Amino acid sequence: MIDRLHLRELDWVSTGLMLLNTAVGVVLIASATHFLGGGFVWKQLLWMAVAVPVFFLVVAVDYKFWVEISPYLYGLSFLVLVALLVFGRETSGARSWLHLAFIGGQPSELAKIAILLILARLFSEYRASFANVSFGLSAVFLAGLPMIAVALQPDIGTAACFLPLPAGALLLAGLDRRTIAFILIAALAGGFLGWNVFLKDYQKKRLETLFNPSQDPLGAGYHVLQSKIAVGSGGIDGKGFQKGTQSRLRFLPARHTDFIFAVLGEEFGFAGVLAVFALYFLLLARMFRSVGKSRDRTGAYITFMASSLLSFQFFVNVLMIVGLLPITGVPIPLLSYGGSSLLTSYVAVGLVVNVRMRRFAYV
Amino acid sequence: MEDSPIYEDLSLIRKRAVWVFRLVGLLFLGAAFIYWKIQVLDHRKYFALSEANRTRESVISSPRGILTDRSGAVVLGDNQASFKVSFIRENAVDFEASIRATAALLEIEDSVLRQRIESYKFLPAFRPVIVKDKLTLEEVSRIEGRRTEFPELVIETEPRRQYPFGPLAAHVLGTMQEVTAEEMRSRPGQRRLGDWVGKTGVEAAYETRLAGVDGTLIEVVDSLGRVREELRRIEPRPRPKLVLTIDYDLQTEAEQLLAGREGAIVALDPRNGEVLVLASSPTYDPNRFINRFTPGEWQSLIASSDNPLLNRAIQGLYSPGSIFKPIMALAGLDAGTIGPQTAFFCGGSALFYDRPFRCWAEAGHGSQTLVEAIKNSCNIYFYNFGSRLSIDTIARYAEMFGLGRATEIEIPGEKAGLVPTSAWKKETLKAPWYPGETISVAIGQGPLQMTPLQIAAATAALAGRGRRIRPHFSLEAAREPPSSGALETVALKDFETVIEGMWRSVNDGGTGRGALVAGFDVCGKTGSTQTIGRAAAERLAATGKTVRTHSWFTGFAPRNEPRIVVTVLVEHGGLGGATAAPLAGRIFGLFKDKYDR
């Protein structure tokens, strides 16, 4: 399974950056929740204590094995998502939480990993220079099924976060003009249908106020405006740890989860934002570079999709904070409070480290 | 290009990955630019916004639904604007110093203030905790005048329940109390700090019907808590008034009649169960309950020996005595033990089971028919046929009239009373029922226990010739029927014989003559019940002291198509005919004057 040669190749840089980012997250959670009860800091540390062993387990077992069992993982997570739709209890308006005996979690987060692995399995056999339509359709279908299940919860934001997986895989496989045209048409049709059939009124409103937040300062535009005020009032050096008035005066919703970056902006200013950007950039750069280090297609696809996944969520969140994207309820990987999200991020980084570690064939 | 079996050719893939990574790098630059624009270039604008932007959300409490009497015009419970001051923990710079300064400003004890605030520690720090209410205008201006020194204090108005007639119908209306910290914790989100909730009476029974939907006010306040702008106001939605069945004039009269006594008066409409009067004495002023900070006042009410908080009409359990006789008579007639013409001789006392039993009239009533026995409330007559009925048969008839069971009136706390059976005795006292005990039950003594309201409801069934009603306080048609379903009609023969006896009791010089109202055909029955055993009473009498009996009257009027039932109980009032019957007569009289024009 693992030997000393592998251990020598373990990517301590990625691992270290991942842990460092989590630590930054804990500091921000501490600041965002210091005036509330609930012990969010301790819970997050507890989740970290769970995620680290999981990370090493993911790294220890050859990624070929994970790819091998991916159909089962995929089937299982899809079943859980469907079961949630049927039997789930609503938590803040969506049936996205699985309540097991002691812990609750969002299965949609871990479904991302299953999709990632099964797409890697699909594309590992694909050797042409460009993806053809049937391959593209398979990828869209595989990612689309669980995506629809999540979108029906209804949790459009999380569903949207599945996009970078098939999109990344197809990008890597190469897209010719015909495929691009096909995808564009499909996207337009889907968008039209989604707007008219699937989107709930509040979601439409969010999209509308995205373009004009002040039209409804206390309704859907309220959070965008308040979040922007939080970030903007931070200035260059911020108001200081636990000194943010925006978050303290409860203008920020979900300040320890989706809006944690606004807390960063307000309390640590532009300097803090740049520092976290830098940390995140280093981690993503390292992950993207691992694509080139992969031994085979499977590894390359895994690494690329994992990197795309984290990048996508990072930017969706960071741009949502300043009102450039709609508020979707997407946490920022590694920084936001939340066990499922943290676990998924650790597994994603773990897979990348896994692939990089086994880049040499010891034959 | 051929793939090697070990290292696949990934050059194309690598190239594409590098492209995407460059895109990600560009996104980082773009995002950094956007944050730079917002945080550095537009910093002043957003900083100013964040300073001005301290919106404050407050609750506009909804007034409670108004309570009126049955005319809809006399307001029994309404609302009055009142000032209260709250403490916001989060705004206190130095908590300890702030407690001291606030206590001095509001003229309350440090420790009281601290305890009050700390008992709501489980709430977020920005939630205001009410620390003093019923502020005078002078207090309001004093606090407002030092606004800038006390950013942690906020003055709000609240509508406060007020009962214009003070103690009038207090036992019907009930009491209100501030929601407790425990209630808030057990049902989060439903109750807010400082909310008033009905605890007893109509206020509790119709809590959801009366409590309006609170409104919200969102204002922009500056760092000192001064209001700069009102952003949004959602007006509270109070509920429409609740019209009660209570008749203001009759209720007032009943309470005046009971003043200085301990007892209860119930009057209801036998056609539909509407309660016209429900008075219990002594009483209290429910306005005094609406008080957050001086619990001492109602502690003294609770501790008071004459127990003003006890609603004697629904919670007081009394032996019915002779007012049970009409029910007994109906049982005897229906069971065939007696007929309308059956007569017994009363010589003042008689032997049953080798023991002497006495009639209340020592000289005796002579030969009596049933009608005469009811008119004169002759015990010997009832001993004679009662001894031929089993206790379980008597209980069956009593239960037909709803005795021994709560009437399911809306207000909480009603007692069920007791109609003994042989099974009951075996279970609770582990002893068999003795026939000698049945004889006591035949004249309404023994273990029988009833509330005045139960007696009134049973009398209504009698007046309605078997049609039972459920007493209630709301005139609204849409009242949910109790879970037990519809009431069964009492199908008995010879109601008229018993009613004839009750009519003669009032109109033909019987024990109930005190309740006579000219031209109103009142039918009634008196009762006088011993509150201590006969032996004890005789011992007391020997020392020259007497313990007066409880005084009962129950009846209805007019004889045909009755429209009102009145039940009166006066504790230690002496003979029913002497005390309770005249009180009932006043109620009947007033009713006739008011409604028979």
Image: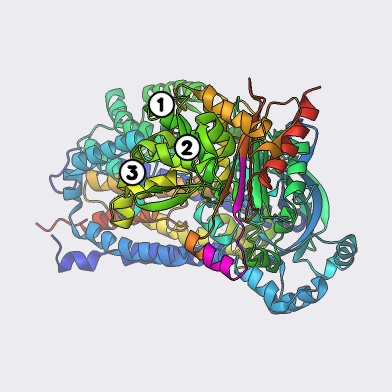
Q: Is residue B336 left or right of residue B443?
A: left
Q: Which amino acid, by three-letter code, is at mark 1?
A: Asp
Q: Which residues are magenta?
A: B537-553
Q: Which amino acid, by three-letter code, is at mark 2?
A: Phe
Q: Quadrant of the N terminus of chain A?
A: bottom left
Q: Is residue A266 above or below residue B516?
A: below
Q: Which residue is mark 1?
A: B334
Q: Is residue B587 above or below residue B320?
A: above
Q: Residue at x 25, y 54 (%)?
A: A355
Residue most extreme to the left: A363
Q: Residues within 10 Å of mark 2 (few under 14, many from 20)?
A: some
Q: Position of residue B202 (x, y in %)?
A: 63, 43
Q: Residue at x 82, y 73 (%)?
A: B105
Q: How is the image coloured?
A: rainbow
Q: Which mark is residue A112?
A: 3
Does the rendering let one see residue A351?
yes
Q: Position of residue A140 (x, y in %)?
A: 33, 30
Chain letter of the residue beneath label 1 in the structure image: B
Residue B555 or residue B386, whichever sits in front: B386
